[in-house]
Amino acid sequence: MGYEEFTIEGRNAVIEAFRSGRTIDKLFLQDGCQDGPVMTIKREAKKHDTLIKFVSKERLDQLSETGKHQGVIAYAAAYEYAEVEDILARAEEKGEPPFLFLLDNIEDPHNLGAIIRTANLAGAHGVIIPKNRAVGLTATVARTSAGALHYTPVAKVTNLAKTIEELKDKGIWFVCADMDGTRMYDLNLKGAIGLVIGNEGNGVGRLVKEKCDMVASIPMKGDIDSLNASVAAGVLAYEIVRQRCM
């Protein structure tokens, strides 16, 4: 689809976007609207597992670019999402043990774009992000990835913890980043592995962290105790690369 990010406004336009197969990241509906076209939009959104947010007319007026939203605004992804199975198939085609990035509540598009770029350069087979409380594949993400989004599949899932459970059944081990974890150099990060990175404020969520097999910390010598999420992802990713090359 390229790097253009679409804001779609108006009831018919949003219905047609869903029916044409365009990927809708987020749907905003005006509180209280329950007429036929809006009910149709809600059915289409649920069918496509799209996040729906009910907001006031005033909020829609703020979001609107045209002033003619008719109580409906949709944000369409700037790039198509892959499926988790596509990422695993990519690893199999290359004859390599899967190497995945899983991102928990990364909300800054610049961080997401930078992490996708790192994932590509580190040889990861794909990136998995959650549907809720996370940025999607916006135009900013695409630009910040510096072209990596063309080559690195990104899958969006409803429940990250459940996805980890399902992937563990396929023989993949998971390590998450946390300052209270074991020093990354002391962990065995070889083989099929998923690297889980959380946001800068709260880190990896409790439920997701509990599903991980290992918790890795990055040695720090300075006066502050945290790294930017994309930098932390890069440091840990290249320790995984180092061990995979041994």
Image (cartoon, rainbow, N blue to C red):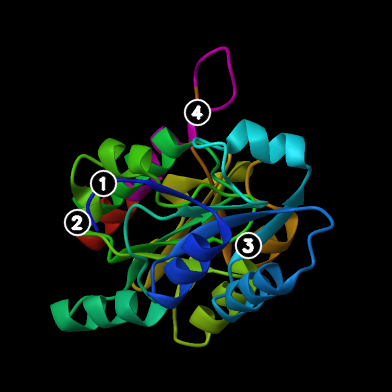
Name the residue carrying label 3.
51
The answer to whether marks 3 and 2 mark residues whose Cβ atoms lie closer than 8 Å is no
- Residue 179 location (% of width, % of height): 61, 38
Q: Looking at numbered disc 2 in the image, what kind of residue is underneath it?
A: His
Name the residue carrying label 2.
150
Tell me which numbered mark, 4 or 2, is placed earlier along the sequence. Answer: 2
Residue density around tag 2, few if under 14, some if 14–19, many if 20 or more, within 10 Å: few
Tell me which numbered mark, 4 or 1, is placed earlier along the sequence. Answer: 1
Per the rendered image, the range of residues in magenta is 221-237
Residue 227 marker: 4
The answer to whether marks 3 and 1 mark residues whose Cβ atoms lie closer than 8 Å is no
**Residue name at image x 52 percent, y 65 percent:** 12
Tell me which numbered mark, 3 or 2, is placed earlier along the sequence. Answer: 3
Q: Looking at numbered disc 1 in the image, what kind of residue is underneath it?
A: Tyr
Disc number lying in front (3 or 2): 3
Q: Looking at numbered disc 3 in the image, what kind of residue is underneath it?
A: Leu
Q: The N terminus appears in which quarter of the rendering? A: bottom left
Name the residue carrying label 1.
3
